[in-house]
Image (cartoon, grey):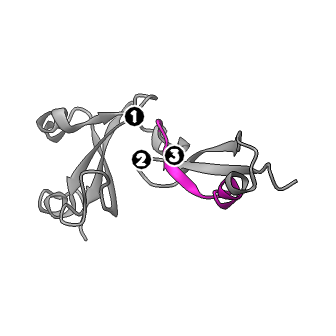
Amino acid sequence: MDNFKVAIVNYICPICGRVAEENIICNSLLTPKVASEVEKLHNQNVGYSDHACKDCAKYKDDVVYFVGINEEKSTNKDVYRTGQIAGVRKEASLVSEVEKFIITLEDETKFCFIDVNIGKQIGLWND
């Protein structure tokens, strides 16, 4: 039957970019065109999860994650991630300095975007 398709889609961790959860979707409008669109989504990343992946969530009570971005390549709709991630203890003065920019996920994991060059200047990463 070409009118109905099912796909497994991925929601990625907003901190590290790995798969945080998988969901099953299907088309509710039973037409070949819509079924084809669902089929194309199989195993694709469709958005960011509202919580961190298991690995990032392990440290949610201890750190705020700083995620490196390239401000020049970023837009208002999406940030251009550079791959650098650093966990900074919640008690650190850096965390209190950027408190208004910290994003809290549904599972209480906290993160903040930081320009990769600024992160390098303050010693969050070496490269």
Q: Which residues are magenta?
A: 36-51
Which of the marked residues, 3 or 2, is nearer the chain's N terminus? 2
Q: Which residue is mark 3?
A: 55
Mark toward the viewer: 2 or 1: 2
Q: Nearer the viewer, residue 24 or 85?
A: 24
Q: Which residue is mark 2?
A: 14
Q: Is 6 positioned to the left or the right of 109 in the image?
A: right
Q: Amino acid at mark 1?
A: Thr
Label 2 environment density (alpha carbons within 10 Å; few <14, some 14–19, many ≥20):
many
Q: Tell me, yes or no, whether the highlighted magenta stretch contains residue 41.
A: yes
Q: Position of residue 3 (x, y in %)?
A: 80, 51
Which of the marked residues, 2 or 1, is nearer the chain's N terminus? 2
Q: Tell me, yes or no, whether the highlighted magenta stretch contains residue 102.
A: no
| Image quadrant where residue 116 sits | bottom left
Mark toward the viewer: 1 or 3: 1
Distance from disc 2 to disc 1, alpha carbons, whole Å, reads 10 Å
Q: Which residue is mark 1?
A: 109
Quarter of the image with the C terminus is bottom left
Q: Position of residue 24 (x, y in %)?
A: 70, 43
Residue at the extreme bottom: 127
Label 1 environment density (alpha carbons within 10 Å; few <14, some 14–19, many ≥20):
many
Q: Amino acid at mark 2?
A: Pro
121 versus 114 height, above or below: below
